[in-house]
Image (tube, grey):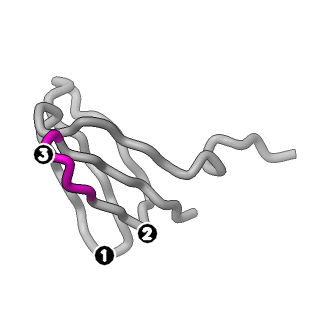
Amino acid sequence: MQYQLKIVFVDNQELVLDTTQKHGFSDDLELFEVTTSEEIFVVPLKQIKYISCDAGIFQQGS
């Protein structure tokens, strides 16, 4: 399943990833890790203002 993820940085630049496969925080909670179908992004949390994603990934299947 792929979904859209948007990262807004503290300098108000935005990164919109339309082919996100998974995302999460590193074990030490200092990095945000995103895997898309093309590449892997690792961003220091101190550079992130907020993160939003398509709510459809949280819906329960029937």
Where disc 2 sits, the SS reads strand
For marks 3 and 2, give the CA distance. Answer: 24 Å
Mark number, residue 3: none
Left/right of residue 22 with respect to residue 33 in the rendered view: right
Specify which label sits upstream in the sequence, 2 or 1: 2
Q: Are marks 3 and 1 in contact (CB under 8 Å)?
A: no
Residue at the outermost right position: 62
Q: Residue at x 61, y 49 (%)?
A: 57
Residue flagged by tag 1: what amino acid is it? Glu
Eyeballing the image, is 54 above or below 24?
below
Residue at the outermost top position: 28
* Residue position marked by numbered label 1 in the rendering: 38
**Mark 2 neighbour density, 10 Å: few (under 14) some (14–19) many (20 or more):** some
Judge depth for marks 2 and 1 and give the one in front: 2
* Residue position marked by numbered label 2 in the rendering: 19
Question: In the image, which residues are magenta?
Answer: 10-14
Q: Residue at x 16, y 39 (%)?
A: 10
